[in-house]
């Protein structure tokens, strides 16, 4: 939900200034030696400090307790039971060497590695994992971690390195969820810490350990010399290359950009706004882009709103979005036009592009069929009662302004009325908006159930009691999370996706792409989903 | 001195009013700390997370109970725990406070030096063109926002000259450069006010007398006119301090400095009530103290104003 954060006027001026400054001092040697480092022998990659710029203090270091830190710090500190391979889109061994899942998707049995230690010197055992999963269900955990372990009915540890987790209801998404940093496994002692302590400290089994966390200033990680259990995917034996990783909190965009351009103070920044890409590229930085494996910009439509009860109006909104034009304007072409409710990087991606083709003519005729025939002097359609077709959305940024513009051409008004960050969750769940927004990052189709499910889920399209298709959709969404068989599950997700798009319970607009910018000296930060894995990262000598 | 007793009482009322105002303002604006904490959670049951956090933070209690607890706690110096940092809000505040104080104090000092120097120079300059150039500076300075000056300074001194670090520089030079960003606008407004007052003073009869004594121009401007023209400027310092503290927010952001300004903005954003209350209360206390101090300085500058008046 924070993929594109609200920017203010200060940033715009800063950007202009930074542009001026780089224009003045570039010209001399840009480009240079990117890619040249690939031949450096593995043994020569060791050493160095990687400085990473963060735009805000994450509020903690443990993804189990605070949100969003999973993208960065937390992933370097703790390992997960399983690894989600972004290429094969399959779950592979990590701290767990093997597992079995019961056919009813209720029982998961794991076999653990026996050579893993935490930073505090204690060993990984089934009991530790049990303590971990139990700790996530405690009061005070306010991140998504809690929703992952909800519904666990029983955890048993038949032997030192065997653990079985049982759910009351089927939960096919559990294995993929376990690969997320939210459920990074920490030592028994850390798991037992009160939530407020855990947010500031954690002992994991990751390739780095926490050395220092000073809120609003920096987070310092040091390498663990005895680390030797990276997932196979990285083809990496032993410890990480970097000696040290320092996260620095730098709130101002143009300063972060300037600091990474120099390479002295920062070598890596992420969540780069697309508007800076040209500037950073011409300054010789390497830009990498990672596609969000879950959704992206996706607008749930409130089907209980008096304007959007009529499926024809919703469909008009759906095909009234010119997605190609949208990504060009809103993100300079960095994001990708949505082709379904899930991103192409999701293992259960479902192509619904046929239903998402831009067709203004058809959209207008749908609106007319729905009774929105008269157009006022303001260009907005009215119905027989003289009501204006005016919808409210909870966000005001470049993206929504583009949509506002596109829908206005159809005669639909989109009023941008953003709630404050602290009230956003509540405002969105209360149904006071006609058009909402949603953002999910987990590489599992269950995000659709979490968002649109009614019996179990957040029901963000506010399905009415007499909505038959809505009930059918809910059934499919619940069923996909009870189905282990890949093909069966895919079929269910496909059906659900088609209904979501065709009935326009939601409007998928774009799949968002995280932009990372780094010094050409820095190599091999590996994106897995939106997480940064630092195990292979290394810095070429200056 | 009785007048000062009454002023002190007013001061207490101002501080209490600021505390109460901040509490209810933050209560009225939509959203609460539970919403801030759960923001960014992309799981399913956000409602449940919200409700649970509210209960843990005590936000589900009646507002007057919450207010009473906050007020009685504050009177004992306990403002509660920062919701995000999970340690006493007072500790969080006073960790940042010295940084802001240094920045604002140095900024103010530089502003006074800049403003006074400029005004005196204007009066001492004989060349018309130079005078007009100097006179045109303060209005320009006043209209330059601190963050803009800060960004330019940062570009020059950090990214081009490498004299300071762009990020969280702890050196004195770093502090000095950041405080220049603050001082430019403040210096401009001091100079504007002072120039106008100097004009008035220099055309008044007592300066005529001084001239007739045969004092040098420098002596007249600096020894005599400046002293009389300074009074309104001292009065305005009370508000200039406020402007300075406001300016620190942006300056701290641009220079990635730890400070109260940044702290408060983040705290209001996330509805971190304890931190906001400490900050607002402290700001009110500073405001009251500075104004009492300004009152106390008057008699020293102008003998006609007495402490007992």
Image (spheres, rainbow, N blue to C red):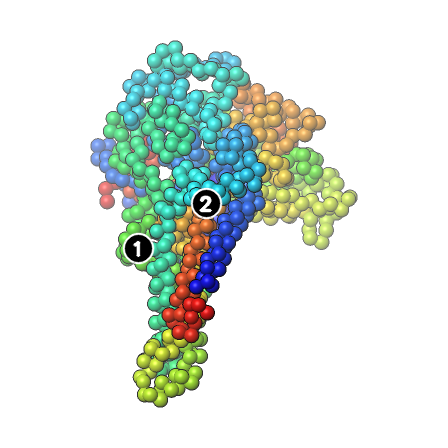
- Disc number placed over residue B174 in the picture, else none: 1
* Residue B270 seen anywhere in this rendered image of the structure: no
* Residue A138 seen anywhere in this rendered image of the structure: yes
- Do circles 2 and 1 both sit on a common chain? yes
Q: Toward the viewer: B20 or A136?
A: B20
Q: Residue at x 30, y 17 (%)?
A: A114
Tally of marks: 2
Residue B137: x %, y % from top left? 41, 71
- Disc number placed over residue A106 in the picture, else none: none
Q: Toward the viewer: B304 or A452?
A: B304
Q: Tell which circle, 2 or 1, labels the residue nearer the N-terminal end.
A: 2
Quadrant placement of the C terminus of chain A: top left
Residue B88: x %, y % from top left? 40, 40
Q: Residue at x 46, y 25 (%)?
A: A138
Q: Secondary structure at mark 1?
A: helix
- Depicted A100 relative to depicted B100: above or below: above
- Depicted A342 relative to depicted B249: above or below: above
For label 1, the crowd category at 10 Å Cα-Cα, with few meaning under 14, some 14 to 19 and many 20 or more, is many
Q: Chain of mark 2?
A: B
- Residue B129 location, quadrant: bottom left
In the image, farthest residue toward the right: A384
Residue A335: x %, y % from top left? 48, 41
Q: Secondary structure at mark 2?
A: helix
Q: Which residue is mark 2?
A: B75
> Relative to residue A472, is residue A333 drawn left or right?
left
In the image, farthest residue toward the top: A158
Residue A217: x %, y % from top left? 35, 44
Q: Residue at x 53, y 39 (%)?
A: B66
């Amino acid at each position: 939900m924070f993929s594109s954060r609200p920017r203010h006027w200060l940033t715009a001026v800063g950007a202009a200034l930074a542009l001026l400054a780089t224009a003045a001092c570039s010209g001399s040697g840009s480009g240079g030696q990117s890619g040249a480092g690939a031949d450096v022998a593995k043994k020569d990659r060791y050493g160095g400090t990687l400085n990473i710029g963060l735009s805000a203090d994450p509020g903690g270091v443990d993804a189990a307790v605070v949100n969003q830190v999973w993208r960065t710090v937390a992933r370097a500190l703790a390992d997960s039971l399983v690894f989600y391979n972004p290429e094969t889109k399959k779950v592979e061994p990590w701290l767990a060497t093997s597992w079995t899942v019961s056919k009813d998707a209720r029982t998961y049995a794991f076999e653990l590695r026996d050579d893993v230690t935490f930073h505090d010197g204690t060993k990984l055992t089934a009991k530790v994992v049990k303590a971990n999963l139990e700790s996530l269900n405690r009061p005070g955990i306010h991140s998504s971690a809690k929703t992952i372990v909800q519904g666990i009915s029983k955890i048993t540890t038949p032997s030192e390195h065997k653990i079985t987790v049982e759910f009351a209801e089927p939960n096919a998404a559990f294995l993929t969820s376990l690969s997320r940093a939210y459920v990074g496994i920490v030592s028994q002692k850390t798991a037992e810490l009160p939530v407020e302590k855990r947010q500031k400290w954690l002992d994991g089994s990751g390739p780095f350990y926490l050395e220092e966390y000073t809120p609003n200033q920096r987070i310092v990680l040091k390498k663990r010399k005895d680390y030797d259990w990276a997932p196979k995917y990285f083809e990496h034996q032993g410890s990480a290359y970097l000696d040290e990783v320092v996260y620095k909190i730098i709130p101002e965009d143009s300063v972060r950009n300037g600091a990474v351009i120099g390479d002295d103070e920062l070598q890596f920044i992420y969540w780069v706004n697309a508007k800076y890409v040209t500037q950073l590229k011409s300054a010789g930085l390497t830009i990498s882009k990672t596609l969000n494996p879950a959704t992206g910009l996706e607008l749930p439509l409130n089907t209980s709103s008096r304007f959007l009860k009529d499926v024809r109006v919703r469909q008009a909104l759906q095909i009234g979005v010119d997605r190609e034009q949208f990504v060009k304007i809103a993100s300079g072409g960095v994001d990708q036009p949505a082709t379904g409710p899930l991103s192409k990087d999701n293992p259960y991606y479902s192509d619904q592009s046929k239903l998402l083709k831009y067709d203004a003519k058809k959209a207008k005729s749908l609106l007319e069929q729905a009774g929105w025939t008269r157009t006022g002097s303001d260009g907005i359609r009215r119905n027989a009662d003289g009501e204006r077709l005016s919808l409210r959305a909870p966000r005001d940024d470049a993206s929504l302004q583009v949509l506002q513009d596109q829908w206005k051409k159809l005669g639909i008004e989109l009023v941008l009325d953003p709630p404050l960050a602290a009230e956003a969750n509540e405002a969105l769940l209360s149904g006071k908006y006609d058009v909402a927004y949603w953002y999910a990052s987990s590489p599992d189709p269950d995000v659709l159930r979490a968002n649109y499910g009614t019996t179990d889920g957040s029901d963000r399209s506010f399905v009415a009691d007499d909505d038959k298709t809505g009930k059918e959709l809910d059934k499919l969404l619940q069923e996909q999370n009870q189905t282990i068989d890949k093909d069966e599950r895919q079929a269910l997700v496909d059906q659900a996706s088609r209904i979501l798009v065709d009935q326009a319970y939601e409007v998928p607009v774009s799949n968002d792409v995280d932009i990372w910018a780094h010094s050409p000296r820095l190599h091999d930060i590996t994106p897995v989903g939106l997480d940064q894995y630092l195990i292979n990262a290394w810095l070429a000598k200056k | 001195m009785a007048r000062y007793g009454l002023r002190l009482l007013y001061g207490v009322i101002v501080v209490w009013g600021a505390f109460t105002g901040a509490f209810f303002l933050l209560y009225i604006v939509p959203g609460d700390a539970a919403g801030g904490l759960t923001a960014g959670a992309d799981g399913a049951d956000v409602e449940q997370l919200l409700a649970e956090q509210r209960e843990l933070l005590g936000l589900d209690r009646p507002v007057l109970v919450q207010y009473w607890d906050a007020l009685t706690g504050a009177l004992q110096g306990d403002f509660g725990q920062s919701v995000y940092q999970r340690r006493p809000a007072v500790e969080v505040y006073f960790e940042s406070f010295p940084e802001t104080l240094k920045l604002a104090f140095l900024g103010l000092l530089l502003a006074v030096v800049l403003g006074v120097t400029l005004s005196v120079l204007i009066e001492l300059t004989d060349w018309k063109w130079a005078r007009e150039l100097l006179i045109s500076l303060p209005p320009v300075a006043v209209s330059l926002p601190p963050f803009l000056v800060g960004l330019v300074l940062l570009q020059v001194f950090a990214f081009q000259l490498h004299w300071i670090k762009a990020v969280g520089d702890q050196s004195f030079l770093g502090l000095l450069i950041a405080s220049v960003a603050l001082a430019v606008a403040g210096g401009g407004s001091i100079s504007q006010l002072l120039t106008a007052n100097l004009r008035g003073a220099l055309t008044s009869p007592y300066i005529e007398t001084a001239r007739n004594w045969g004092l040098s121009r420098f002596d007249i401007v600096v020894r005599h006119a400046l002293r009389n023209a300074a009074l309104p400027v001292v009065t305005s310092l009370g508000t200039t301090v406020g402007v300075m503290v406001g300016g620190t927010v942006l300056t701290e952001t641009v220079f990635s400095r730890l400070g109260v300004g940044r702290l408060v903005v983040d705290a209001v954003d996330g509805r971190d009530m304890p931190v906001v209350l400490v900050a607002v209360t402290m700001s009110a206390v500073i405001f009251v103290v500075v104004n009492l101090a300004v009152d106390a300085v008057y008699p020293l500058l102008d003998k006609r104003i007495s402490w007992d008046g």
